[in-house]
Image: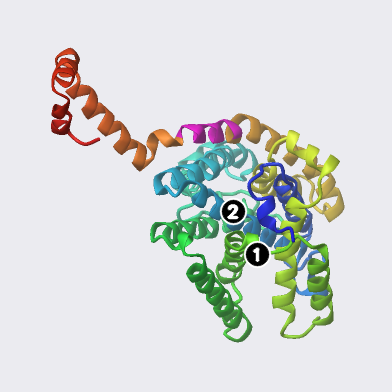
Amino acid sequence: MRTFAAFSGSRDNNFNLLRFIAAFMVIVSHSFLLSIGTSAVKPFGQSFSIGLGTVGVFIFFTTSGYLIAMSYCNRHDLAAFLIARGLRIFPAICVCSLLSAFILGPWMSSLGIVDYFKDLSVYKYAINNSWLFHRRETLPGVFVSNPYPREFNGSLWTLPIELRCYMLVAAIGVVGLFRRRRIVSILLLASLIMIVIACRWGGFTTPVWILPAFFLSGVLFYINRDLVPTNGLIGLGLGMGAALAYRTMLLPILAGSFLVYAVFWFAYVPDGWIRKYNDLGDYSYGLYIYAFPVQQTLAALRPGIAPLPMFLAAFPLVAGLAVVSWHVVEKPSLALKERIGTFSLFNWRWKAANAATSEQSIAGKALNNRIIDNPASLAELPPQ
């Protein structure tokens, strides 16, 4: 029986395409919200009580849980893990925040250029959103008359939650639970059950609870990937179960399980021409962080624009920004991960030990002669 473990060691997969599709879903959904306003019915929102964009975010968090757990388990080095995560998240969002505050913001603001830059909230937006610390949602005088007013980049609300999930993975790794699969699986499963109970009966339906559930599902899937068969019939069965459980209390559990399984089945099983997307790059992050400001700009410049024209106008612009972001900012930043070993705690110790050895070997000839004359003197050398 072939399991997902047979694929997890290879970089030849469909994760880039999957995340692109997730970002595409978010952009489609936001085209309704930002062109019509809060009264807009998002795609599938009325029938399933959940919008298309929300499903896209669930996909992001599910894949993130899996890949972040893999990232830590491949290193087992906290410093290297944190540097790798930082290089993936912060360079692109820093550039996006600076462009938003100092280029697009003053252009779209109803304030004069002097009054705009005199407002301290401009600089707080640039700083806080660059580091995702106390995220700022507005810029002075910007998008005040839009159908969805003032919000500059509403997509960023998920990123602080994702960072907290990264810290959870780091904590699990530091205490050594990734080496104890049974214990960590029980803890993760218990956490998921508690989240489901809290959301279903406790009224905790905020994203702070729901999104980590999908992240933890991805972590749990990675840890037990050698136990999960790659059989499309399993996904079909979960999908049929979710359909039969429509409007029952079992729907969230079955639908969530179906989504998680379908995500990883799509990520690994389909091959052939579909893998050619990997030749392009990973544009999903750029799509995600630039789409909302572009769509808000279109709503401001073209009052009354409908959802479809907004999407058709926005997507090429956003895709262009995402391509530039990937090739100019994200990819070069990720290339630095190859040097992470230089900064890891273990390599610092290794270098320190070698530096000490170098100092001790200044009188190399004398030491070598001493060893040749008296091999027992090796015992006097400091341990390395």
- Is 14 left, or right, of 120 in this rendering? right
The span picked out in magenta is: 331-339
Task: Check if mark 2's residue and mark 1's residue have beta carbons within 8 Å.
Answer: no
Q: Which mark is residue 227?
A: 1
Point out residue 183 in the picture as x, y percentages from the top left corner.
48, 70
Figure quadrant of residue 247: bottom right
Three-letter residue code for mark 2: Leu
Q: Which residue occupies the foreground of this view, 171 or 252?
A: 171
Query: Marks 2/1: CA distance?
Result: 35 Å
Q: Which residue is mark 2?
A: 156
Three-letter residue code for mark 1: Leu
Q: Height in image: 306 above or below 96?
A: below
Asked which secondary structure carries label 2, the reply is helix
- Is 361 left, or right, of 39 in this rendering? left
Point out residue 174 in the picture as x, y percentages from the top left corner.
39, 57
Q: Is residue 155 magenta?
A: no
Figure quadrant of residue 1: bottom right
Point out residue 362 in the picture as x, y percentages from the top left corner.
18, 17
Asked which secondary structure carries label 1, the reply is helix
- Is 119 left, or right, of 359 in this rendering? right
Q: Height in image: 265 above or below 108?
A: below
The kind of secondary structure the magenta stretch mainly shows is: helix
Label located before the other in sequence (2 or 1): 2
Q: Nearer the viewer, mark 2 or mark 1?
A: 1
Point out residue 315 in the picture as x, y percentages from the top left corner.
78, 43
Q: Quadrant of the C terminus?
A: top left
Q: Is residue 151 visible?
A: no
Disc 2 crowd, CA 10 A, few/some/many (<14, 14-19, 20+) = some
Which residue is found at the position 63% from the left and 46% from the top? 9
Q: Which residue occupies the foreground of this view, 160 or 21?
A: 21
